Amino acid sequence: MSLPPAPWPGPLVTERLLLRPVEAADVPAHTRLWTDPEVRRHLGGPVAGEVVRARARGCVGLPGLFSLVRRQDGAVVGSVLVEAGARDDGRPEVSYQLLPEHWGRGFAREALQAVTALLPDGAVAVTQEANARSRRLLEALGATVVERFSAWGEPQVRYRFGGNCRVPAGDGPCEITCRCFHDSCCKAFNDGTVTPTLRRDG
């Protein structure tokens, strides 16, 4: 696996953000990420109520799942998930969501720069082909297209971040999706039961 050295997933601090494991007080913000139509536009639509409840029970402290906290006021603005050895010869997969009112402020780039800097062997990310904003951000961050495929009835694009990826300036709103199903994460999100079909993203 291509995980950074301990502590992981310990808190990461950027200029404006604190990336830390999910706490109980963060659950309402994560619930919005799972149910907001704009956030879910390229993720198959809002998550069903029973799945939301299972995720709410399992997300607190889930390894690799971060709340993105604005340092200025402590507001949770989004989340990022790093799944070790998800695909592509063991490279971690990164998925990311941001609440709509925080799009366009550079938080996506700031968070991804912090996370990918701790993944020296690189990472992968998958997004719908139709998600132009996500694709622009990934490409601006230096990720390259390695695969095009169809899943859940929609064309998808898989990107790869190389090791020691350098991040250019600028930003755009982002929703990077994850298409993998992993037993450990499915158990956490689904109350101890492995039900991969219920989990289509981070």
Image (cartoon, grey):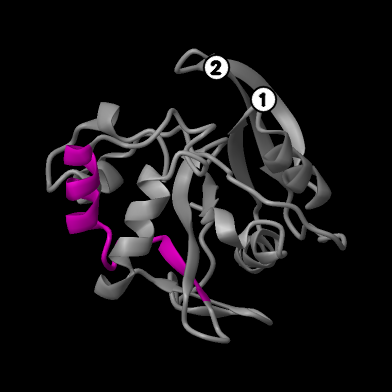
Q: Secondary structure at mark 2?
A: strand
Residue under the point 49% across and 61% down: 78
Name the residue type under label 1.
Answer: Glu
Residue under the point 82% across and 60% down: 166
Residue 12 falls in image quadrant: bottom right
Residue farthest toward the bottom in the current orientation of the protein: 72
- Crowd around label 1: few <14 · some 14–19 · many ≥20 (10 Å): some
Region rendered in magenta: 49-69
Locate residue 15 relative to residue 8 in the image: left or right. Answer: right
Q: Is residue 52 magenta?
A: yes
Q: Secondary structure at mark 1?
A: loop
Locate residue 5 relative to residue 121 in the image: left or right. Answer: left
Mark 1, residue position: 129
Q: Are marks 1 and 2 in contact (CB under 8 Å)?
A: yes
Residue farthest toward the left in the current orientation of the protein: 192
Residue 133 falls in image quadrant: top right
Residue under the point 12% across and 40% down: 193
**Is tag 1's residue or tag 2's residue first in the polypeptide sequence?**
1
- The one of 114 and 76 positioned closer to us in this rendering: 76
Q: As displayed, is residue 150 above or below residue 196?
A: above
Residue under the point 17% across and 57% down: 57
- The one of 85 and 16 positioned closer to us in this rendering: 16
- The one of 171 and 59 positioned closer to us in this rendering: 171
Locate residue 68 relative to residue 106 in the image: left or right. Answer: left
- Crowd around label 2: few <14 · some 14–19 · many ≥20 (10 Å): few
Query: Which x, y percent locates residue 59?
Result: 27, 59
C-alpha gap between disc 1 and disc 2: 8 Å
Mark 2, residue position: 154
